[in-house]
Image (cartoon, helix red, strand yellow):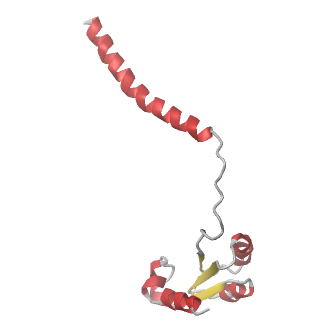
Amino acid sequence: MSVMIDAVLLVLLALVLLPVGVLLVEVLCALVPRKPVPLPDAIRPNLAVLVPAHNESVAIRRTLNSVLPQLAPGDRLIVVADNCSDDTAQIAVDGGAEVVERRQEAQRARDMRSIFECGTWRKIRCRSLRR
């Protein structure tokens, strides 16, 4: 009987130690430093950063000052002023961002899908292709 209990406990120990061992190997592999592989500038596509904002006049300038230095030439910073009752949109324009003002009180503070659904994004994209 004792041999049977020992065998069952050994199997349970193996079942517990296997995932722990795999996790240990993954953690140790993650600690090995790697050199980042720089991509040539020609490979990096242009990107657009969308910043949703609702009455963010106090903090929008700080956000723009944080994001703009990280953008490469050809990248775009677009602030979506979502039913703002303050001067968030004007501060964003003054800060160098493109601004889309959305005034749909029924969909106040909804997700960014509404920009794509209402056709606003197509207008922005088409405008940028004409440049």
Left or right: 59, with 121 as reference point = right
Q: Which residue is farthest top?
A: 2
Q: Is residue 110 above or below residue 1?
A: below
Image coordinates for residue 17, horizontal then vertical, percent: 43, 26
Q: Hey, which quadrant is residue 34 in on the image?
A: top right
Q: How many marks?
A: 0
Q: Say which quadrant the C terminus sits in.
A: bottom right
Residue at screen point 48% across, 76% down: 111
Image coordinates for residue 127, horizontal then vertical, percent: 56, 92
Left or right: 121, with 57 as reference point = left
Residue at screen point 60% across, 69% down: 44
Left or right: 28, with 73 as reference point = left
Q: Hey, which quadrant is residue 101 in on the image?
A: bottom right
Q: Is residue 3 above or below residue 113?
A: above
Q: Say which quadrant the N terminus sits in.
A: top left
Image coordinates for residue 105, horizontal then vertical, percent: 49, 88
- Asked if residue 102 shows in the view, the reply is no
Residue at screen point 63% across, 39% down: 32
- Asked if residue 14 shows in the view, the reply is yes
Q: Name the residue nearer the viewer: 112 or 38.
A: 38
Q: Name the residue nearer the viewer: 37 or 105.
A: 37
Q: Name the residue nearer the viewer: 27 or 51.
A: 27
Q: Is residue 115 above or below residue 14?
A: below
Image coordinates for residue 92, horizontal then vertical, percent: 69, 84
Q: Is residue 115 above or below residue 44?
A: below
